[in-house]
Image: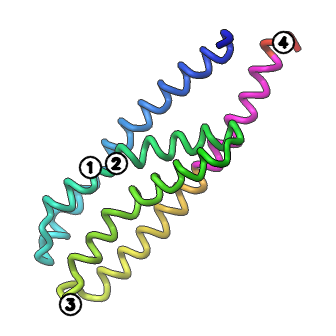
Amino acid sequence: MTEVEAERSSRRRKLELSWVIGVLVFVIVRFIVAYSALSDYGLTVWIFGFLDIATAVPYAVGTARLVTSLVDKNVQAAARWGIIACVSFLAPYAWVAWAGRDGEFPSAVYIAIVVLVVCLGANAVVGILRRVRAARVDSVASVDHAVGV
């Protein structure tokens, strides 16, 4: 491994760790905010919280490695990490929808779930694309700098 590759690998690990921590903090704050709203409908909130926190790490790692796979133009790895990120993202929302399947939830709850999935999902896709573009530009600049251009 060259010095440039080692530096890039170290930087990627640090960025991935900071992303995992950020996602975990977001999920915990979201759980605290959603706790009262979800418990009002008889939902076992602790199951949702456990599922949300348990899927946060695979989601964060999946999205981080999806970005690096796309930057590296590794389509197979990108597909694999994309699936992991997608399943991890959808699991808590799918569980909430499933938990209210017996008509316990008003239609507004399902509409809110769909709006959250669409908005947060779109934000994730836009963020991933933005990070891929930025990393590719940074990668070109790093190579130029390493070869003295």
Which span is picked out in magenta? 128-144
| Mark 3 vs mark 1, CA separation in Å | 26 Å
Residue at 50%, 56% in the rendered image: 83
Cα separation between marks 1 and 2: 5 Å
Taking the image as shown, residue 102 lies to the left or right of residue 123, namely left
Q: Quadrant of residue 30?
A: bottom left
136 within the magenta span: yes
Disc 4/disc 1 C-alpha distance (Å): 44 Å
Query: Which quadrant, please, contains the N terminus?
Result: top right
Residue underneath mark 1: 53
Residue type at the position of mark 2? Ala
Residue farthest right in this picture: 149
Q: Earlier in the sequence, mark 4 or mark 3?
A: 3
Give residue 79's position: percent from left, percent from top.
Answer: 59, 53
Under mark 1, the amino acid is Ile
* Residue identified by numbered label 4: 147
Q: Residue at x 35, y 43 (%)?
A: 57
Kind of residue indicated by mark 4: Val
**Helix, strand or loop for disc 1:** helix
Badge 2: few (under 14), some or many (20 or more) residues near its Cα, within 10 Å?
A: many
The residue that appears at 79% across and 28% down in the rendered structure is 140
